[in-house]
Image (spheres, helix red, strand yellow):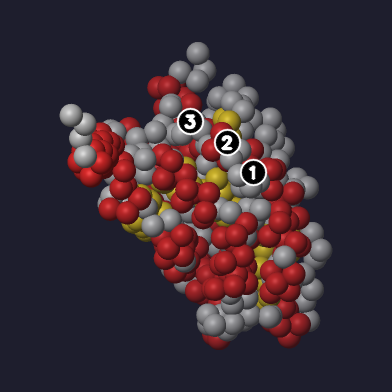
Amino acid sequence: MSEPPHTRRGRLTRLVLAAALLASLALGPAACADNSADPVTVTVAAVDFMHGIEALVDDFEKDHPHIKVNLVFLPENSLRARVPKDIASEASHYDIVAIGPYEAPIWASRGWLTRLDPYAARGDYDRQDFIPTVRESLSYNGGQYAMPYYAESSFLMYREDLFAQAGLTMPEHPTWQQIARLAARLHDPGHDVAGICLRGGAGWGNLLMPLNMVILTFGGRWYDENWNPRLTSPETRRAVRFYVDLVRRYGQPRASEAVPADCLRTMSQGRAAMWYDSTALAGRLEDTQHSRVAGRIGYAPAPVRRTDSAGWLWAWSLAIPVTAKDRDAAWEFVSWATSKDYLRLYGERLGWVRVPPGSRLSTYELPEYRKAGHAFVAPTLDALAAVNPRRPGTHPQPWTGVSYVGIPEYAALGNRVSAEISAAIAGRQSVDEALAKSQLFARDVVEGAGYRD
């Protein structure tokens, strides 16, 4: 006997429902991941200078609801101490880390970092839009291991109004001897105005950034081509004495403790006539909401003595450790925070004069940015174009890099040497005493690591 039609339809319905139930069980959580799964948390070890990203991260999370961003801002010295330990120990606290041209090739050679150019080839990220010297500084063996958030060289910032009042003119291409004479004329402690502001606080990324530029342009160096230390050579000694004497005589109070933020505050409050430092800080000086001297600043190339140029090269950049919990999610954030769209969003939301500079060529084509930064846009590009990372001084060097020695041991060595020279600025010892100790530190490093074998 055949089944009634309604019975057959009922059995068919039950079979279809059963099959659907089995299929949903087989798919498990993936079937509804887009709607119910917890978002991936991406933890970023950022340097203090990146604080603007905090105001914009909600935009990223809105467009990427599957990713939650945990920003951890650290002072420069703390960041440099904490991050390598985290990666080397595989503690995996950070999915994205802020590094620069010093760390990128060294950490890549150790296998600590994820190669990013294959990720960057997707979509319209446009890695070729990065300023070439900056992009190359973050590369190793043909691969790029970090993407620049902003990049910098260095130049001289000076008060045009004070120069005019004193009847002085900034040379088109100043020498350090000319800057010393100008600082002597403009130094006015009675009115709380220093002739020049310079970094003096210990730290290889602090005092040694400008001081190494002085050493190189004076003909000095850390090591010769055979890794013999040269910190007590006549040229290096002359350069360090010049720097220490300049800041002691015509610099800001408590110069031996000064970090970039101190000089920025001093200059923006009108308490210094000149300041030699990062090109990335010009936007802060021109920000009318935070600077009393906005619109009154001139920009000149980094002072020289025996070289044609003397600017450093640095780029605070975002890298993904191989220990990152979710590299794809990490890349989504890195690509957003270093993109053309991010830089435009930054200008529209936080002010064009404050846009992170020096990374993308296209930024310098934006009419809004060129108008806001008209005083420093061209000098910044000129400074970055003049950098020669392979031979920044008068001698060949057995490493690639500007304002640092490109070896793993330099971080600790630079901190020790900078502490000795900072003590000389404070008057606790002579320059000769500081350099004699530093020469021994530098010799111990190359002998212990076998660089001269």
Quarter of the picture containing the N terminus is top left
Q: Position of residue 301 (x, y in %)?
A: 73, 59
Instruction: Say which label, 1 or 2, has the lower sequence index.
Output: 2
Residues 32 and 328: in front is 32
Query: Mark 2: which amino acid?
Result: Asp
User: Is the residue under label 3 in contact with that under label 1 (CB below 8 Å)?
Assistant: no
Instruction: Say which label, 1 or 3, has the lower sequence index.
Output: 3
Determine the image quadrant of residue 339. bottom right
Query: Mark 1: which amino acid?
Result: Arg
Q: What residue is at 46 percent from the left and 34 percent from the top? A: 114
Mark 1–mark 2 distance (CA, rounded to whole Å): 8 Å
User: Is the residue under label 2 in contact with that under label 1 (CB below 8 Å)?
Assistant: yes
Q: Position of residue 389 (x, y in %)?
A: 66, 39
Q: What residue is at 74 percent from the left and 69 percent from the top? A: 367
Disc 1 packing (10 Å; few <14; some 14–19; many ≥20): some
Instruction: Say which label, 3 or 2, has the lower sequence index.
Output: 3
Dot 2 corresponds to which residue? 117
Query: Mark 3: which amino acid?
Result: Ala
Residues 314 and 352: in front is 352
Dot 3 corresponds to which residue? 108
Disc 3 packing (10 Å; few <14; some 14–19; many ≥20): many
Task: Describe residue 73's horizontal placement relative to residue 224 as left or right.
Answer: left
Mark 1–mark 3 distance (CA, rounded to whole Å): 18 Å
Dot 1 corresponds to which residue? 127
- Element type at mark 1: helix
